[in-house]
Amino acid sequence: MNVRAFFLFLMFPIASWAQGYAGLGGNAEGFARPESGYQFQFPKDHGPHPSYRIEWWYLTANLKDAEGNDYGVQWTLFRSALKPTESEGWQSPQIWMGHAAVTTSDTHYFAERLSRGGIGQAGVTAQPFEAWIDEWHMRGGDLTQLSLSASGSDFGYDLGLQAQGPLVFHGDRGYSVKSADGQASYYYSQPFYTVEGILHLPNQDIEVTGQGWLDREWSSQPLAEDQSGWDWFSLSFDNGDKLMAFRLRGERGDFTAATWIEADGQTTSLPDGSVLLTPLETNHVAQRDIPTRWQISLPEKGIDVVASALTPKAWMGTRFEYWEGPVTISGSHLGRGYLEMTGY
């Protein structure tokens, strides 16, 4: 850990980490809280919301090369506020954290960046849209067309993305409930990107094409105190339909929710209990047992599929550790997608 990373690490509210994964169930006193009925405003809401404690711009992509080999790409920028008041320069309470990864059938590359807010090293602007940390960037006039780049010590990528469908709002018009106690976030996605570009891997550059999915979410306390983590799926089926589904694991039981997305962008919000997410197989990864093969059942839409990890090795050994990687879909529907698992 370098000196800058060490001091940024000390600035995080360490005492709250036990309250849900990465402290996301911790006390949010003084911060704004999501409320139902919020009217999204674009392009403003593509930018940051500093009165809320946490926020992210989260892009994943399922890609193939000319020979049909599968790859996954992740690019994420997290914003975390230490307090609900804003200041300039080094006094800014905003902390930024970037994660990037490339996954192949047998290898997982990842990197992490950290920055204190207010000094220009990281941030987001809404118009024109740009999210960056150091030389990593996601930028475009708006979210319709983006360029994406990141690099680590042994990988990198430069990709172009073009939206082929509308933004999608989860839950009740973007108000996404996360627990029986009412914890919630504002949550929308752009799941209709086509992607093309270059992966820079050891000893070779690889041209790739595929599909991308961007998640935008912000809140101040998205987890209940007893919720230890989540299992989140973004699935794109070969017929053009899509499914976002998650399971939040808690001492009082699991909480689930899903959004069914038609090929034309029409959505159906599905409440707790509608989707069944069942682990079928685990692998021992990073000294813990991680479920890397899942059955996903959504009877209302005739979905009964198995999502299998491209590789079990997709462990993000970052400041807050988690598993994130591409999956292939078989069963009643075929396709590809992404799986994220935290709190294991």
Image (cartoon, grey):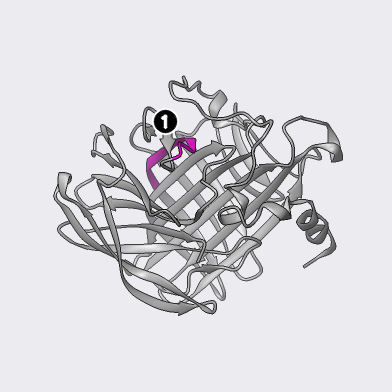
Measured as percent of width and height from the top left, residue 332 is found at 14, 58
Start-end of magenta stretch: 181-194
| Residue 238 sits above or below residue 138 on the image | below
Q: Residues within 10 Å of mark 1 (few under 14, many from 20)?
A: many
Residue 105: % across, % down: 40, 74
Q: Quadrant of the N terminus?
A: bottom right
Q: Is residue 214 left or right of residue 203?
A: left
* Amino acid type at image mark 1: Gly
> Regarding mark 1 in the picture, which secondary structure is present there?
loop
Report the number of numbered marks.
1
Task: Please report the residue visible at 81 percent of the width from the left and 65 percent of the height from the top.
Answer: 2
Q: Is residue 174 magenta?
A: no
Quarter occupied by residue 165: top left
Q: Nearer the viewer, residue 173 or 57?
A: 173
Using the image as rendered, state which of residue 207 and residue 232 is in the foreground. 232
What percent of the width, then of the height, locates residue 241? 23, 44
Residue drawn at x 54%, y 79% is 287
Q: Name the residue at 55% across, 69% down.
A: 109
Q: Which residue is mark 1?
A: 174
Q: Quadrant of residue 83?
A: top right
Q: Is residue 184 magenta?
A: yes
Vertical order, 20 against 186 (above or below): below
